[in-house]
Amino acid sequence: MSECPVTPSNARAQTEGVSLYKRLRIGGRMALREKASAFLDLLEKEEGGPGVTSSRRNQVLKDVARHRYYEHTPEELLWGCRFAWRHSVRCIGRFFWRQLEVRDARHIQGASDMAHACMEHLSSATNGGAIQPLVTVFPAQRATIPWRIWNYQLVRYAGYRAEDGEVLGDPAEAQFTAFCESIGWKAPKTKGLFDVLPLVISGPRCKPSFFTIPAQKVLEVPLSHPDLEWFKELELRWYAVPVVSNMLLEIGGIRYPAAPFNGWYMGTEIGARNLADWSRYNLLPDIALRMGIFEKRESSLWRDRALVELNRAVLHSYKMAGVRMIDHHTAAQLHVRFEDDEKACGRPVTGRWDWLVPPLSASTTPVWDRSYDPTEYSPNFLTQNPPRGFVP
């Protein structure tokens, strides 16, 4: 059931909501005062939200006028992060946006303390396998060079590029792996397919420094197949929690360049992209060979058959390990429910079709034949340029 059922009594509120979202649209040249005011209006209108007192509104506007800055209260930060997830046009998991929790790390002012907070994020988010949607918010940008986490995700696997161009591990991380080595990180003596990269953190008057993630902080899932016994021989694994760490969190005009956040995995992210893409681990030919179905004729659909079995293995393995994961059919169905909720609340339904449609059996999901408005609204998690000194 929608959180905001459409009734005559809330029709006016929905009209006002459309007007508010015009002010929340990202882009253009809005002053900080306008952005802050629009965020407070959004917060005030939120069903079940904390509300906004007139004294708080006056204080924010005074701080903006005097300091060209204001600080979010813990409740504003929590709901701002939840709104950011709700507005994320590339996420198919937004049905669960109200479950997001926040770790407030805005007081931290050192790279080692940031690294420690990231490790604690991994522990809390992993939650013994019952993955908790979580965001850790580090200091807002006040200086020209802000605090940044250089990693794409808190946990990713190294990619070692040989002289002939071949990569051992994850090719998507080859350049970052080389950068880590250039600042002093030492790869394991015996390099493997799944070596966890260090965290790299920089900030005001702080050059990029690396921090090794203790093994006990990274829950990994060994992959097996419900029917194919030989699948274990591939010795594949993947980490439990995808903590995105290179995006900018923007709330009411205040920018947080370091705000790692996570939900839980959709199976195809691993089985149809990370392990299957030709530019990543490219495992389909090997799996097809072991299945006895590999041949040069593409029309035999050996890739498709291998892809399905790889995805079955991922879903099976995470279930056996007790690690929360969702399949792409269920995720797409829940996104349609999310869309219905947004419509009922008078909010615009936004999305990026190319991100929302799953990479496996896309046309069998209910999002396939829908069109989406890709407009981004504030608050939001946004892409940002790489830190100075690194070009991915």
Image (spheres, rainbow, N blue to C red):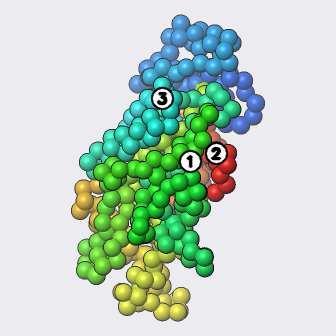
Q: Amino acid at mark 3?
A: Ile
User: Along the polypeptide, which appears first: circle 3 or circle 2?
Assistant: 3
- The answer to whether residue 144 is left or right of residue 348 is right
**Which residue is disc 3 drawn over?**
108
- The answer to whether residue 49 is left or right of residue 313 is right
Quarter of the picture containing the C terminus is bottom right
Q: Secondary structure at mark 3?
A: loop
Q: Position of residue 213 (x, y in %)?
A: 40, 50
Q: Does any portion of residue 202 appear in the rendered image?
A: yes
Look at 43% across and 45% down and name the residue there: 262
Label 3 packing within 10 angstroms: few (<14), some (14-19), many (20+)? some
What whole-number distance in Å separates the C-alpha atoms at marks 2 and 1?
7 Å
**Residue 150, numbered circle:** 1
Marks 2 and 1: CB-CB under 8 Å?
yes
Q: Position of residue 141 (x, y in %)?
A: 61, 30
Q: Is residue 161 above or below residue 67?
A: below
**Residue 387, numbered circle:** 2
Q: Is residue 287 above or below residue 197?
A: below
What whole-number distance in Å separates the C-alpha atoms at marks 3 and 2?
19 Å
Q: Does any portion of residue 313 appear in the rendered image?
A: no
